[in-house]
Image: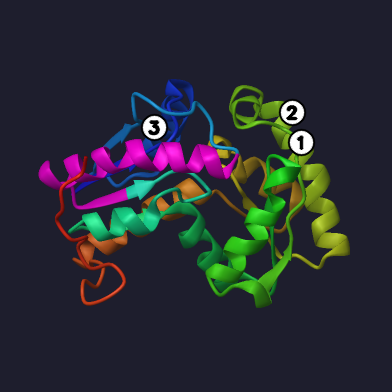
Amino acid sequence: MKILVINPNASKSVTDHIRHELEKIKRVDTELAVTNPEHGPVSIESAYDETLAAYHTMDLVKKANADGYDAIVLACFSDPGLDAAKELSRVPVVGIEEATLHMAAMLGHRFSIMTGMRRRIPTRDWHVRLRGCEAFYASSPSLDMSVLEMDSNPDKAKRRILELARKCVQEDRAEVIILGCAGLAGYAEDIERELGAVVLDPTSVAFKLAEAMADLRLHHSKVGRFSNPPVKEIK
């Protein structure tokens, strides 16, 4: 089995971090590749960033299909370009946000999402509604840390997450905590040990789901929403 994990931002550091963590959990028979676009934003913290990142990510999705990968993971919690990637791909494309919201809804009565920056909280609210998970949604507190800061300063990120997650459990009745950034990959185990509630690392959740989907030979339906885009001249 071959799985490609795409970090849609152009940060090599975040890509290396994701690769390091997924190597620990992949099956021995899974061939893992982790990559990022050469161009685009080095972090994704706005709708503008998402749009730029999605454009450059599509080429990697096309190449993954041509190179015979069995599944693709988009490792950004905003899922930039996810619908377009599903249109383009013959194999399943798993967005870490979409996958983890549904997983969290299965594991507890309510979930909270740790969000890097305050300005992204409305996007979290919108995406929860988009995925049909609003009934399970408790809150989305802000860490007030950038993507690159969360990646480079794990001790500070973990302290901040633990502080906010305790409030979510006590005040918002959250039973599951989602680490809402691919840059937080690998932090869940330490935080869960101290917190007691379930803590989900979206990149790990999506990757293991991708392995399962590849095993089952699942793919996106091509009869409607994710049908192949019409071929046309692009000027």
- Residue 110 drawn above or below residue 191: below
- Residue 37 drawn above or below residue 112: above
From this viewpoint, is residue 68 visible? Answer: no
Total numbered badges shown on the rendered structure: 3
Q: Which mark is residue 19?
A: 3
Of callouts 2 and 3, which one flags the residue occurring earlier in the amino acid sequence?
3
Q: Which mark is residue 156?
A: 2
Task: Identify which residue, 44 or 33, lies in the foreground.
Answer: 44
Q: Nearer the viewer, mark 3 or mark 1?
A: 1
What residue appears at the point 36 percent right and 59 percent down from the top-left corner? 83
From this viewpoint, is residue 54 visible? Answer: yes
Q: Which amino acid does label 1 sit on?
A: Asp
Decide: marks 3, 1 in contact (CB < 8 A)?
no
* The residue stretch that appears in magenta: 46-72
Q: What colouring method underlies this structural image?
A: rainbow
- Residue 160 drawn above or below residue 166: above
Secondary structure category for the residue under label 3: helix
Q: How far apart are marks 2 and 3 (CA)?
A: 21 Å
Q: Residue 144 carries which label?
A: 1
Secondary structure category for the residue under label 2: helix
Tell me if 68 is positioned left or right of 49 in this view. left
Decide: marks 2, 1 in contact (CB < 8 A)?
no
